[in-house]
Amino acid sequence: MNATLQNTLNAPRYRNDGTLVIQGGRPIHGTIKVRGAKNSVPKNMVAALLTEEITEIRSVADVRDVAIMAELVAAIGGQVTRNALDGSLTMDPRHIAPMSPDTAAHFSDISRIPILLCGPLLHRFGEAFIPNLGGCVIGARPIDFHLAALKQFGATLEERADGIYLTATHLRGARINLDFPSVGATEQVILTAVLAEGETELSNAAVEPEIMDLIGQLQKMGAQITVETDRVIRINGVKKLRGCVHVALPDRLEVASWACAAAATDGEIFVEGARHGDLFAFLNAYMRAGGDFEVTETGIWFRRSQQGLHPVCLETGVHPGFMTDWQQPFATMLTQAAGVSIIHETVYEGRFGYVHALNKMGANIALRTDCLGSRCRFGRLNHEHSAIISGPTPMQGSHIAIPDLRAGFSYVIAGLIANGTSHISNIGLIQRGYEFFNEKLTSLNVDFEITGRNNK
Ligand code: UD1
C-alpha cells in the first residue's frame, strides 16, 4: 500500500486535541515495537535533499513529525512515497524548488526541523526561506548557534517577520565552535559542510546516537566525515552526493518511556526493536532506581526489580549522559520510589513545567532554582531546573492537559499509576513522537478510551 504525497497545502492542520480517559492502578504487561526515531528520521529526510538521486529510508515510524516533514518536502516539489506495510519512505528530491512564502506560512510554528533545510536549500538554489519554528515549549530554544555557523559558511541572513531568508553564492568550509554541544546546531553544520568547499572543523559538537546515525547515512551518500576525540567532527566537502538505502535508528526515547511505565506500574514490557547500545546511561540509572532489564536478540524486557524502586540522584546532560527527554517519564517513575530523589536538568531551563500536574495527582515534587548537582548554565538565572521528588506517593486520577510531548508520556504514566480515572487532554501531542499509541495501550491491556476528535 503506497501513498504518494503531493502538494498538501490544503490538508487540515495537525491537531493536539482529544482526551485520553484512562483507568489506572493496575500493572501493565505486554509487548510493543519501536521503529525509526522521531529525532532521527526527519533529519534523514533532510539529508536526502542533498542529492538529486532517490533515497529510501526503512523502518520509519508513523509519527507526526515525520508526516510534517513529508508534507514539507512534497510542498516544495519533492515526491515522498510511504509504504504503510513495511514503513519504508522513498524520497525523490529531483524536482524540489525554493520554498514559496505561502508554503513557509503553512509550515510556520509547527516543527523545529525546517531550520535544518538551510544547507540543502542553499547548496541547491543559493537561497532558502525558513519559516518560524515550532516544537515543544521547554525553554527559550534560540537558534543563534545555527545562524552564526551559517554565516561562517558564507551565508547572508535576513530575519523577517515570518521567518529567515538566507542567500549564499558559495559555501566554504569553516572552523566552528559551539558554546554548548547542541544537537540541532551540530546537524546544521554537518548538513551544510558535506557539500561546502574545503574542510570544516566543528568543535564542542554533540555526539548523540541520532547524529552518528545521520553521519552514517551521509557516508553512504558519499560524504567524508570523521568523528574525532573530544567532540571534534571534521568534514571534507565533496562535490556531489548520491542516494542510498538507510535503515532508521530505533527510537531510544520511546524505549525509555515504556521502560519507565513498566517499572512505575510494577508491570513488565518487552520492547521489540530496542537497541541496547543507545541506552547505557538510561539503563544505569534505571538499575540504580530499581528497574530490571533483560536484553535479547530482538529487544529488551523491562520490569521493576524484586527489591522495589529506590530513590536516585541524577542529572541530565548531553550524550553520553542521561538524556533530557528521558527525564519526565523517569521522574514520574521515581514518585513511586521509597525516599527522596533529585533530578538536576542541565539541557533545557524549562523542562519541569509538567510537575504541577503530577503534584495535583498526589506526587510530592518540589522545584528549586539552584543546581542540585554540578554547576550548570541555569544556576544563576533563576530557572526552576532542579527537582526534589519524595516518594512513594499514592496518585489519584485527575483532569490534566498535556503541555509537550515527553511531559505527555509522563502524564500517561501518572494516569496508569493513579487510582481511579484520569482525563488527559491534548493527547494528540503524543502522536508527534509515539506511533500507534492507542494500539500499544490496547496491546498492553490498558483500560482506556479516547474522547474528542482524536481517534488515531
Ligand atoms: C534535540 C531533540 C530534543 C532533545 C535535544 C537535546 C530533535 C528534533 N529534538 O533538540 O528532543 O531534547 O536535542 O538532546 O532532535 N541552544 C542554544 N542555541 C542554539 C541551539 C541550542 O542556546 O542555537 C541550546 C538550547 O536552548 C538548549 C541546548 O542548547 O538549552 C540544547 O539544545 P539542542 O541540543 O540544540 O536541542 P534540539 O536540537 O533543538
Image (cartoon, rainbow, N blue to C red):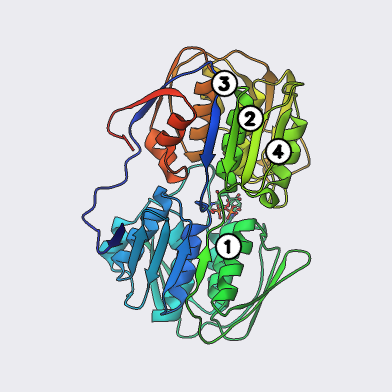
**Kind of residue at disc 1:** Ala
Q: Position of residue 10 (x, y in %)?
A: 21, 55
Single out the mark in the foreground, 1 or 4.
4
Question: Is tag 3's residue or tag 2's residue first in the polypeptide sequence?
Answer: 3
**Kind of residue at disc 3:** Pro
Label 1 residue near ligand 1, CB within 8 Å: yes
Element class at badge 3: loop
**Kind of residue at disc 2:** Ala
Does any portion of residue 286 appear in the rendered image?
yes
Q: Position of residue 265 (x, y in %)?
A: 59, 22
The residues bearing labels 1 and 4 have C-alpha atoms spaced at a distance of: 35 Å
Q: Which residue is mark 2?
A: 331
Q: Which residue lies at the image location 27% right of the left edge and 33% below the top edge?
A: 453
Please determine whether, in this image, residue 406 is positioned above or below residue 234: above
Please determine whether, in this image, residue 232 is positioned above or below residue 358: below
**Kind of residue at disc 4:** Glu
Q: Which residue lies at the image location 72% right of the left edge and 32% below the top edge?
A: 292
Q: Which residue is mark 4?
A: 294
Question: Is tag 3's residue or tag 4's residue first in the polypeptide sequence?
Answer: 3
Q: Which residue is mark 1?
A: 185
Q: Residues within 10 Å of mark 3 (few under 14, many from 20)?
A: some
Please determine whether, in this image, residue 237 is positioned above or below residue 100: below
Label 3 residue near ligand 1, CB within 8 Å: no
Q: Which numbered marker is on residue 256?
A: none
Task: Classify residue 214 by image quadrant.
Answer: bottom right
Single out the mark in the foreground, 3 or 2.
3
